[in-house]
Image (cartoon, helix red, strand yellow):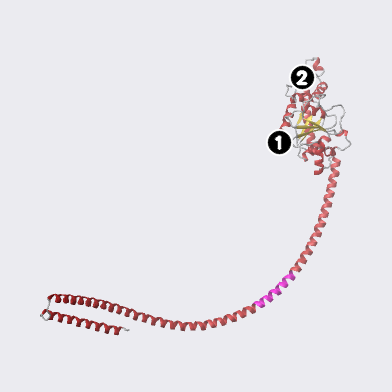
Amino acid sequence: MDFRTERRLYEAAHKVGNALVRFFLLFAGLVAGGRIGQNSQVARLQRRIQEQEDAISTSVAIQARAAAAFRNAHDELRQTEERMAIIEQNLRLYEQDLHGVRGATSSVEDSHRRAEAERQRIEELSNEAEVRALVANEQRARAKADAQGAKLEREDAVRSRLDAESIARDARVQQEEAENNLREGIRPVIWPTLAELQATKERLGYKDGLFHFAIAGIAGSGKSSLANALRGLRNGDDGAAATGVVETTDTIARYPDPDPKRPFVWYDVPGAGTLSVPDWQYFTDQGLYIFDCVIVLFDTRLTATDIAILRNCARFDIPTYIVRSKALQHIRNLAVDMPDDEDDDGESDEEDGTGPLALGRARELYIQETRASVAQNMEAADLSEKRVYLVDKDTLVSVVKNRPVKDALDEAKLLQDLLAEVHRRQVSEA
């Protein structure tokens, strides 16, 4: 139903309503004029008429609002139809554009297909070129490798020749050096193997946790007496090492320290003068390389054997102490042989060298000469300077037993330094 039809229906309904109103008004007038009898009935009829009028007015108002809403809806519909027309027009334009785009797309696709075909052709040509280039590179690489190999072979040959010449030259130098050393009394260094090191430790009773002192030197230097004194024993005491004018043993003797507070072991090493081995071989044959400390003992002067021991100890990084024995005996001999001093009072004890003045001069001379001699020998052997300890065995026994002594020389200092050496080793191994 369109807007015009609805409009006509609305107007017809309005006319019918007006006619009904007029009818009821006429009817009411008849009643009021007395044509209808009773007043109560007239009143009811008037109320009904009024209600009908109110209902008609309400209906008319509703119809008016509906008509207004309809008009608004009709306007919106018209606007919508106008917008739809615009959209349809745009759609037609879009379809036209799309048709053009499709045509352009088809052209682009054709161009793309042609470009793809060209790309594939170029790729095939490129692959073929790469294969040819790869073959050429492989051939060049093989040629380069062959050339490099030939160059390396030439270099190896040259290097081998140079190495051979260097080895021969070094051998000649070493031979000349060895011959030189032999002429100058310098002997070769012999390094023990691990097996030899272990075998020597087992042979000499080396025990972990103990400190092992070796007393080495030529025969007759007083090694056994020093081993006894360092243990607080005099020669002849129970447990003391045997002593004598000549060397009493040709094997190393092992003496544990009797003091349980001192975990030391003292070794009396036979003198080189009693063995049929060269002095430079003495160090290795006696196994001196296993000891924690080596005391080099001499009587009158350092010998080649003593120097060899000191040099090898330095190579093996073994601490060494140089000790001169029989100090009081040497001082007395010096005192007897010294010329008289004009200032002496002529007493008999000074004349025979036993007086305190003579002994004092002899003591000073003994100290000076010994230290100067040792320093000279160490310098001549190209060894670092070391202190020399002058000791007497009986005085050393008293020092070890912590007894008062007189006329002491270096006995207390020697014992102190040996104990300090033990402490250093313990600290380094802790």
Residue at the spot 85% in from the left edge and 46% down from the top edge: 176
Residue picked out by circle 1: 426
Q: Amino acid at mark 2?
A: Leu
Provide residue 230's location: percent of width, then percent of height.
Answer: 77, 28
Task: Return the residue at label 2.
Answer: 357
Left or right for 83, reference 223: left
Residue 159 left/right relative to 100: right
At label 1, the amino acid type is Gln
**Residue closest to the eye, 153 or 374:** 153
Residue 65 visible to an observer of this rendering: yes
First in residue order: circle 1 vs circle 2: 2
The quadrant holding residue 84 is: bottom left
Q: Nearer the viewer, residue 55 or 370?
A: 55
Q: Is residue 137 above or below residue 168?
A: below
Image location (x, y in percent) of residue 385: 75, 35
Q: Magenta stretch? A: 123-140
Query: What x and y, as percent, mark residue 425?
Result: 72, 36
Residue 361 figure quarter: top right
Task: Tell me if 288 is positioned left or right of 54 in this view.
Answer: right
Q: Is residue 299 visible?
A: no
For this orientation, the residue located farthest to the left is 34
Check residue 127 for magenta coloring.
yes
